[in-house]
Every structure is written in C-alpha cells, then in structure tokens.
Image: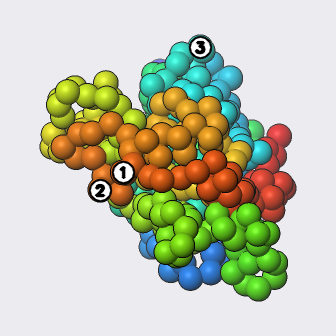
C-alpha cells in the first residue's frame, strides 16, 4: 500500500509539472516574423542594425507596446513615453525629467528622433554603446522606473498577452524564455523606427518646397555659406541630415575655475579623463522648436536664449569647443536662424500613428 501511495504521489506530481509545462508552452503559436525596412533621410548612410536583432514588424509592434506600458516600472505608473513624448519630438518639455514616485533626475530627456543612427555613445554622457544597452538603464534606475529586471521578467512571463507577442517576435517556446535581453531588443527595434525625414528642410532638399527669404537667410548663417552674412558655426556641430554629430563637446554653458569644477562632469564621469569633464553629447536639432527647454540641464527656455548664449561666446575652459566663440549676430540674424530651425520640424513624425501610444 505504501508503495502504491508513493507511486500515485509521483504520478500526481508528474501530472502537475506536465500540466504547468503544457500551460506555459507557446509552440502552438505560429512564428513567422515579417522583415521590416526603414526609410532614411537623404544622404544619410544606412542604419547599422545588429545581426542578432533584425527589424521585424512583430518586434517593432512589441517594442512599441513595451515603450508605452507602465508594467516596466516598480509602481506601474511610469513608462518610456512619459519622458519621450511624440508631440514634443520624443522629449518631455521639462528641464529635468520626473520618474518613479515623482523623483527628479539631474538631466533633461534627450530626443529619440533618429537615435538609431547614433552609434558612438547614447545618453548625454555616452554611457551606452547601443540602443539595446541604453534600454537596460531606465528600467532599473532608481530615479526613473526603479524595477529590478528579474521582477520585470516575471511580470511579463505571467501576463496574458505578452508571451504571445514575444513568441511572434522572437520565437520563444515557453513563457520563461522572456528575458531582459529580449525586452531591450524589442524596445530598440521600436526606437530605430523613429526616423525624421519629412521636415520642410528635407522637402526643400528634395525640390518639393522652397525656403522663405528669412529661412534661406537663416540657412546661410547656420551653415556659414555666405561671406556677406555673419557666421554662426552651428553647422560644424549640427551636421545635416541628422543635425548632430557623434562628438561630445563643452559648449561653454557652465562657468568654472578649472576642469574639476563642473557641477556635472558629463562625459568625464564615464571616461575618467578630466579633459572630458563638462562635455556632453551633441543633440539633434530636428524638431528643436518642440523640444524646449534646452541643454542637458534645461537651463535655456527659448531658442532666443540659446542664440544669446552662443553669440556671447560662452564661458571659457581649457576644453571649450573651438566652434564656440563670440559671434556678431544682430537681432535679424537671430530671428532668421530661428526661422530656419523651424524648418527642421517634422510634422509627419510628430503625428505618425505608428509611433503613438497603442493603449
């Protein structure tokens, strides 16, 4: 009798385990990912897509849901789209961002527009080499979303719908295969689709529109194309078509006695090189009219304030960018520059339903 009881117990446990495994199995769901392609700005080299994370329709759709789902925050109130709002050019309109439990960050949210083309360091300080690596940080950061990645995995594994979406995007066979690695891959896929290529500037370049007199004059000042107009040096750091560069620069917004005196050391925090202190990633100017306030700490509220700073020549330091110098810009010059900057507004991107909150 005892042997029979033991045998029945073993069979019962085996049945429970098999039932759970069968309930967790996703193999019956078709896995047929659809390759996705991107259009890019004219004259921009192709985006470098990791071999282990090709763009698919299913992966992008999953990444979009995760981008807007507060399930990845500790108290289920914060999501990526809080700090990266489509209507604001994927920034949040704040000097510094607000995260979990109302905690304040120390830097402003960078625009994600064309972020997939940036391959030499992400974040203001360049701490992440890839979009996949970048996506790891906000979830676990105690100021941003404050969620342990293991807990994030468990939430998604237990969810009614996400296991199906991960199966369709990545071919997982079991709920337990939902991991941090796949979450950040999906988020990276969605972010790579945030491409701006239909601003008035692009339309002019393609011969589909014309600049106004003020915009054309601002263009010439921005790119220093006329000896009859003042030079601004803008185009050296904000190179078209991305209107950014991979560089990290000290643009003279902080007054310091020496290289160790920056309130925020920026790139120097990552490299440990004192000549990198006070340097920050050059941000894109695409949709710049929608992304105020400006600079890594949001100190300038308007484009007029930004131009006043650059016209002044900024604060000197041993590593001040050579492109930051006192400029001879009159009031008309500044307003024409601003008129040109408005031609970088991409209404197609700002209103594209494919980038909107799916919830």
How far across and down, in percent of the image, does residue 275 sit? 18, 44
How far across and down, in percent of the image, does residue 346 sit? 75, 60
Could you tell me if the residues under marks 1 and 2 are in contact, i.e. CB atoms within 8 Å?
yes
Tell me if mark 2 has few (under 14), some (14-19) or many (20+) residues whose alpha carbon lies within 10 angstroms of its own.
few
Could you tell me if the residues under marks 3 and 2 are in contact, i.e. CB atoms within 8 Å?
no
Q: In terms of depth relative to the viewer, which is nearer, 118 or 29?
A: 118
How far across and down, in percent of the image, does residue 103 sit? 54, 16
Q: What secondary structure is found at the residue carrying circle 3? A: helix
Q: What residue did someone put label 2 on? A: 322
The span from disc 1 to disc 3 (Cα, nearest Å) is 42 Å
| Residue at point 39%, 36% (across, down) | 253
Mark positioned earlier in the residue sequence (3 or 2): 3
In the picture provided, is 277 more to the left or to the right than 158?
A: left
User: Taking the image as drawn, is residue 309 in sight?
Assistant: yes
The span from disc 1 to disc 2 (Cα, nearest Å) is 7 Å
| Residue at point 56%, 33% (across, down) | 300
The span from disc 3 to disc 2 (Cα, nearest Å) is 41 Å
Q: What residue did someone put label 1 on? A: 325
Above or below, 183 against 117 in this view is above
């Amino acid at each position: 009798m005892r042997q029979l009881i033991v045998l029945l117990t073993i069979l019962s446990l085996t049945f429970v385990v098999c039932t759970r495994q069968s309930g967790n199995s996703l193999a019956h769901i078709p896995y047929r990912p659809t390759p996705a392609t991107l259009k890019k700005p004219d004259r921009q080299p192709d985006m470098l897509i990791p071999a282990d994370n090709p763009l698919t329709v299913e992966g992008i759709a999953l990444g979009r849901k995760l981008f807007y789902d507060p399930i990845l925050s500790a108290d289920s109130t914060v999501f990526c789209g809080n700090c990266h709002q489509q209507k604001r050019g994927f920034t949040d309109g704040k000097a510094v961002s607000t995260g979990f439990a109302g905690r304040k960050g120390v830097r402003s949210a960078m625009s994600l527009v064309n972020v997939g083309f940036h391959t030499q360091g992400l974040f203001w300080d360049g701490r992440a080499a890839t979009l996949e690596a970048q996506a790891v940080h906000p979830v676990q950061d105690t100021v941003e979303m404050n969620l342990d990645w293991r807990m994030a995995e468990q939430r998604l594994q237990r969810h009614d719908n996400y296991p199906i979406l991960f199966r369709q995007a990545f071919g997982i066979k079991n709920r337990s295969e939902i991991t941090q690695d796949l979450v950040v891959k999906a988020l990276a896929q969605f972010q790579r689709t945030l491409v701006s290529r239909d601003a008035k500037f692009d339309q002019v370049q393609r011969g589909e529109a014309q600049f106004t007199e003020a915009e054309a004059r601002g263009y010439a000042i921005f790119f220093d194309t006329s000896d009859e107009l003042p030079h601004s040096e803008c185009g050296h750091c904000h190179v078209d078509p991305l209107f950014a560069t991979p560089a990290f620069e000290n643009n003279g917004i902080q007054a310091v006695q020496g290289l160790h005196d920056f309130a925020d050391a920026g790139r120097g925090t990552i490299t440990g090189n004192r000549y990198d202190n006070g340097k920050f990633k050059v941000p894109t100017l695409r949709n710049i009219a929608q992304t105020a306030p400006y600079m890594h700490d949001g100190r300038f509220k308007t484009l007029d304030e930004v131009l006043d700073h650059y016209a002044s020549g900024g604060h000197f330091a041993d590593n001040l960018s050579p492109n930051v110098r006192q400029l001879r810009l009159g009031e008309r010059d500044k307003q024409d520059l601003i008129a040109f900057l408005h031609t970088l507004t991409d209404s197609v991107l700002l209103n594209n339903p494919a980038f909107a909150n799916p919830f």
